[in-house]
Image (cartoon, rainbow, N blue to C red):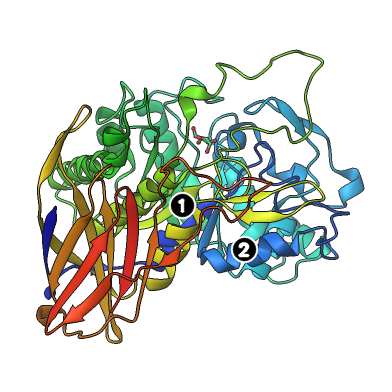
Amino acid sequence: LRARLTVDRARPVGPVSRRLFGAFVEHMGRGVYGGIHEPGHPQADEDGFRRDVIDLVREMGVTTVRYPGGNFVSGFRWEDGVGPREQRPVRLNLAWHSTETNEVGLHEFAAWLERVGAELMLAVNLGTRGTLEALDLLEYANVPSGTTLADQRVRNGRTRPFDVRMWCLGNEMDGPWQLGQRSAEDYGKLAARTAKAMRQLDPHLELVACGSSGAGMPTFGDWERTVLTHAYDDVDYISCHAYYEEKDGDLGSFLASATAMDRFIETVVATADHVKAVRKSPRTIDISFDEWNVWYLSKVPAGLAKRIDDWPLAPRISEEPYTVADGVVVGSLLMSLLRHADRVTSASMAQLVNVIAPIAAEPRGPAWRKSTFFPFATTARLARGVSLRVDVDCPGYDSAEYGEVPVVDAAATADDDGAALFLVNRSRTEEAEVTVDLAPLGVAAVGEALTLSDQDPYAANTTDRQDRVRLRPSPRAEVTGRTLRVTLSPVSWTAVAL
Ligand code: AHR
């Protein structure tokens, strides 16, 4: 099958924010303990952080990391994670039914981020706590010195403030699973009050109000409208969360997940802009897509083992094996984010290590890349400058979930040094021959072309075979005259740097 792409430098969507390539580390399963932190591991540094994991996170090009939750944050007392380690309390992690030792807290995580070279995005607990505790954390983190809390931070070993810019005002507050679930009215008022108070302390914060926890929630749509009606003037972002999975062997719909992400983003943008219009506000609210990924949530056993005497330490939860098809979908979700770069200016792949993660780390064993690592790392490296509109002229197919969808999906970016194309072939059986006129892009040669594909779309990397799935140079990307021709294998993701 053939596809013709039209892409033109003169049709930009918007600048590609580096914050699009963020990730998320939650105190969940083996994300922190046994993930980024494993004292005694042969690769552990002096603070117990695994160097092999740090190297992989750096290779992935992660720019920001949202922390410490997720659902965990709604039961978290931030004070538990600071001060002398031996005095830190051991608590129950109610969200993930496990034991929280608090060995890793704000200081340790910020130190890890410095090694990784990424920005910290903090979430405050608006589930079981409120404005005052959020203010305390902000004072502890951002005030240079001279107050009890700022001086406590200094005594705890951190002279310079953490200077955290991005803050999430709670997490998924409409979820029945959330500690302290609230109505949109209650949460909207609380978010507005807390945002105002936090800005009174530090005016230059960037604040994220919780959107609905998913586009499928009964609250979705009206939640965003109500929350923003209360908090529009006080926040900068509304969050989106979405996880996609293949259901009942319907690979065709799964491969079209970016269609759902496109619609989700456009619906939230429309809702935010509706509130803008009603309020006649000069401000525009952007989207922080701070949880997105492929996650086989329907296979997570309903309710974790909930025995009163069984609170395991860092249990294995949602350590997805990730297939080539999952990697292709992750690549196309990144393309959806790029397509909406004018309004999605922050995003976090959820999560980073072991839990729903592109990186696996075995206890006392190796760390390796899962299939989803590759499209993330390559997009983070190649997507530069501005995102460009791409018209795709190609056949479609009928998907059970989304109706007719194009077989080829595409996104493009360009800066002064060149351009990048990101392509997905959703056909399960046919190659796609893609042609692109390069003249409007002002480029004339292929720099590199990399593909994620396999004869078996369900191939995955495992402990025993850690590089079964990897990126391969695409031999079939060439320029003749002013035309780029790329042949895409069935169920594949490809990046072409020009
Ligand atoms: O990322 C895992 C969980 O998914 C998060 O804790 C929660 O916010 C979402 O439901």
- Residue at 56%, 36% in the rendered image: 130
The residue drawn where x is 57% and y is 19% is 301
Q: Nearer the viewer, mark 2 or mark 1?
A: 2
**In-front residue for pair 479/203:** 479
In terms of depth relative to the viewer, which is nearer, 49 or 71?
49
Q: Quadrant of the C terminus?
A: bottom left
Judged from the image, the secondary structure of the residue bearing numbered disc 2 is: helix
Against 382, residue 165 (above or below) is above
Q: Is ligand 1 closer than 8 angstroms to the Cβ of mark 1? A: no
Residue labelled with disc 2: 56
Helix, strand or loop at mark 1: strand
Image quadrant where residue 2 sits: bottom left
Label 2 CB less than 8 angstroms from ligand 1: no
Question: Does residue 341 appear in the picture of this structure?
Answer: no
Res. 348 mark:
1
Tell me which amino acid carries mark 1.
Ser
